[in-house]
Amino acid sequence: MAASEQSRFFGEEKISKILLRLAPPVMLAQLIQALYNIVDSLFVGRYSESGLTALSIVYPAQLLMIALAVGTGVGINTVVAARLGVGRRERAAQFAGMAAPLEGILWLIFALVSFVGMPAYARMSTSSPQVIEEVVAYGRIVGVGSFGLFFESGWTKVLQAGGDMKTPMAAQILGALVNILLDPLLIFGLFGLPRMGISGAAVATVAGQVAAALAVMRGGLRKAPPTRLWLPLSAQIFRLGTPNILMQAAYTFYILGLNLILAGFSDQAVTALGLYYKWQSFFFIPLSAMQTCMVPVVSFNYAARRVHRCRRMLYTATFFGMALMAVGTLAFECLPGPMLRTFTSDETVIGIGQWAFRVIGPSFLPMSASLIFPVFFQAVGAPLRSSALTLTRTLVLFVPLGYLFSRLGLRAFWFTFPVTEILTASLGLAFYLRFLQHPYVKYAPLLDARRPVEALQPSHPGVILTIARQHGSSGKEIGRRVAARLGVPFYYKEMTALAAQESGLDREFVANLNRNAPKVLYDLYLSTRVVRMAMVAQHQIIQKIAQNGSCVIVGRAADHVLQGNPNLVRVFIQAPLEYRIRRAGEVYGDTREEALENIRRSDRARAAYYRHISGRKWGLPEDYDLVLDSSCGVEESARKILDYLQSRGLAPKELPGESGQPAPVKG
């Protein structure tokens, strides 16, 4: 889908039609993944009851493995896509080349830990010798053999960063089919194959992962960069991937915590919880599809300041999610016995599970909201709220409440689920009501859509001066005076307005890309899809401005965007802290404390933005033609820049502009 077509689709199409178009392929892929998980339990349950308990115990360890593999892949995907978006293909190729070595190193670490630590993990989770033996057998095979999962995760994300979604989906289908085919053959020893029991299920899982990895290897494998670059490249990948790893790992620890609580009652209680998660993965497919599909739509419309469409998407996705999850509620209320007997014939497990399923079933409705709210906040660039909801649900509520309810008995334990979902959904609603009061959201309906369309200012061939500056150094005013003296166009806010026009996004959103980023998650924010769209639009506008002729451009890393331009002169303006504090007070009316905070915040954001698109530290003297201390005064600083241009023959001795004193520039 072309960018303009995508903008129209996300920005104008009916929300329900968008979901109906995007959701089915996502649901198909997730159905395949759900079958991947269910089939192992289906055949293992036919082989032995203790094997089902072993699978439930190993499940959190598998989730941790997936969190490491996929989270690292997300970091690779994000940084590669960001570099491709701004045309830095060589840099993107270096990051893509890190997929194999990085995922390989993680696999070696996880394989070693799995092999050595699995017996202790098993003994911590159960006292049954048979279950311990099966946990160790299954866990060691899937842990040591997880190289397929790790490499497939990295190579898949490289392909997706380049826009290839079909190959990864085909690989997932192939992996699932291999697993499903091999499960009965290896577990029961059909057609002359050895009867391997639960170890056969592990081998089938590993074989499916290897098949998927081979399917994406050709397109995803890239030449590794020189080893001297591994550390800095890995640091940027993990800066973006770690939040995803931690969020995924949160699910690992809460399920492990619940397993340990239930192990105090019986192995059958652990098995019942494991069977709940098998069925949950199946009924959650529609809700997961809603989560996946709403992100690009909400993020685009939020950036375009069409907040009413963001709200409509939230309400529609939640309504669809609840309607579809109601099917799961009915199944858990009416058919718990047949659902459990699909996997087991142990009457103790069935007895525990029937009560558990009926208590958990109603929680599916508030769960729709508790799981959709974090995705919504992620899409509107509020990852702290998103993370807070996820961590509250998985760590703050589930495990402590599970422990408290377990003190009242096994039957009371299962009320942990509906209580957790109701509390999380309530917190999400409180966050959402506060979100609606944010000025960017609250005043969106008052936006004047009839503002004049910006146009490039006429110019002539000559010098292109870019100015990067510290907050409070008067860089914008200096740049404006230099442009006036040279008689050339000056671009600052005009540039962001042009970029907004180019991308279809709101000009305030584009203007505040640096300012919008939450300080602890700059790189993650700057890597979101809609922010990349705005950055690409800015880069294209900067290049058009440069092609138009002589000009002065302030900010937006224009010095990096235009690197290699023969007419480019790069200036960095700095000043002592006390001068900047005083200047911020004069121009913005800041108190000393406000000025200090704004200086720290603004410079940190500018540094993060520059590092994100260039891979270099902001403000290095060697990256500029002239580094200037502006504490000598605005007019004197402008004169020094003009003197420098004249010394290089880039400005005439007699300047066409006037030398009047323009008013200080705010913003």
Image: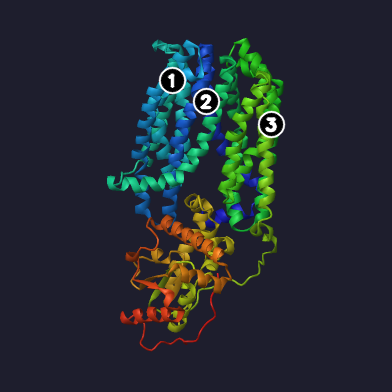
Question: Which of pointers 2 and 1 indicates the residue nearer the eye?
Answer: 1
659, above or below 68, in the image: below
Confirm whether residue 300 shows in the render: yes
Asked whether disc 3 touches disc 1, contact meaning CB atoms under 8 Å apart, the reply is no
Mark 1, secondary structure of its residue: helix
Compared across the picture, whether 304 is left or right of 461 comes to right
415, above or below 650, in the image: above
Q: CA distance from mark 3 to mark 1?
A: 33 Å
Q: Amino acid at mark 3?
A: Val
38, above or below 478, in the image: above
**As drawn, which residue projects farthest toward the bottom?**
654
Q: Earlier in the sequence, mark 2 or mark 1?
A: 2
Q: Amino acid at mark 1?
A: Ala
Confirm whether residue 226 shows in the render: no
Mark 3, secondary structure of its residue: helix
Towards the viewer: 664 or 115: 664
Q: Residues within 10 Å of mark 2 (few under 14, many from 20)?
A: many
Q: Position of residue 37 (x, y in %)?
A: 52, 25
Q: Which mark is residue 120?
A: 1
Q: Position of residue 432 (x, y in %)?
A: 67, 48
Q: Amino acid at mark 2?
A: Asn
- Residue in the picture at 36% in, 31% down: 109
Q: Earlier in the sequence, mark 3 or mark 2?
A: 2
Q: Earlier in the sequence, mark 3 or mark 1?
A: 1
Towards the viewer: 590 or 517: 590
